[in-house]
């Protein structure tokens, strides 16, 4: 389902961007957990401060001009039809943990994944309430919310984001 066709206002569009961002971050975090034994692997994460700045700018634009303006940054780009691409950045803290204590590294990644999943769930539920989309998340088992699994390739965007 193409979410952009359902967007009646700026708040809904903002929520769609948050949902998409969390989907892309989920893929990066899954890679961090599944590729630890690959030669030359280095953990990465999405540029969260850049995304927060983009959201702040979009909200400020909305307050002044009743429109949303999502500006590209060095690592986050917006395209047509709601497309978004993110260049993950090296996560030096996670890299150091992976080299010294694999268990703590995995706990860090699981914690990030759970936080990201909660953010995604809240944004999707708010979007459902705002737009009247009939896909409540409250009844979904945690396995479907948290462990939906990475898509075919984190760098490849799905044709029909949910």
Image (cartoon, helix red, strand yellow):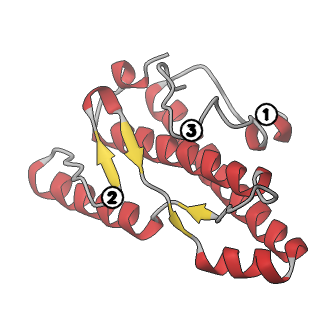
Comes first in the chain, label 2 or label 3: 2
Q: Secondary structure at mark 3?
A: helix
Q: Is residue 92 left or right of residue 63?
A: right
Residue 152: % across, % down:
64, 29
Comes first in the chain, label 1 or label 2: 2
Q: Nearer the viewer, mark 2 or mark 3?
A: 2
Residue tagged by mark 1? 144
Q: Residue 157, relative to residue 14: is it above or below?
A: above
Crowdedness near tag 3: few (<14), some (14–19) or many (≥20) residues, C-alpha within 10 Å: many
Crowdedness near tag 2: few (<14), some (14–19) or many (≥20) residues, C-alpha within 10 Å: some
The picture quadrant where one finds residue 105 is bottom right
CB under 8 Å between discs 2 and 3:
no
Q: CA distance from mark 1 to mark 3?
A: 14 Å
Q: Going by the picture, which residue comes out furthest to the right?
A: 103
Which residue is pictured at 49% across the width and 58% down the height? 88
Residue 137: % across, % down:
70, 33
Which residue is pictured at 43% across the width and 38% down the height? 16
Which residue is pictured at 78% across the width and 79% down the height? 99
Q: Secondary structure at mark 1?
A: helix
Q: Residue 151, relative to residue 122: is it above or below?
A: above
Q: Secondary structure at mark 2?
A: helix
Residue situated in front as seen by the camera: 13 or 2: 2
Residue 58: % across, % down:
24, 55
Q: Which mark is residue 124?
A: 3
Q: Is residue 155 left or right of residue 17?
A: right
Q: Nearer the viewer, mark 1 or mark 3?
A: 1
Residue tagged by mark 2? 55
The picture quadrant where one finds residue 13 is top left
Q: Residue 5, relative to residue 111: is it above or below?
A: above
């Amino acid at each position: 389902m193409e979410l952009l066709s359902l967007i009646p206002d700026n708040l809904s569009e903002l929520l769609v961007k948050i949902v998409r961002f969390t989907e892309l971050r989920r893929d990066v975090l899954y890679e961090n957990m599944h590729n630890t034994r690959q030669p030359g692997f280095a953990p990465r994460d999405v540029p969260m401060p850049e995304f927060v700045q983009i959201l702040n700018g979009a909200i400020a634009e909305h307050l002044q001009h009743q429109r949303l303006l999502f500006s590209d940054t060095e690592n986050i780009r917006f395209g047509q039809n709601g497309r978004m691409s993110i260049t993950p950045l090296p996560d030096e803290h996670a890299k150091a943990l992976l080299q010294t204590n694999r268990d703590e590294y995995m706990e860090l990644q699981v914690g990030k994944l759970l936080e990201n999943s909660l953010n995604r769930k809240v944004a999707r539920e708010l979007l459902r309430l705002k737009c009247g989309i009939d896909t409540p998340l409250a009844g979904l088992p945690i396995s479907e919310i948290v462990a939906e699994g990475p898509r075919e390739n984190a760098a490849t965007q799905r044709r029909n984001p949910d």
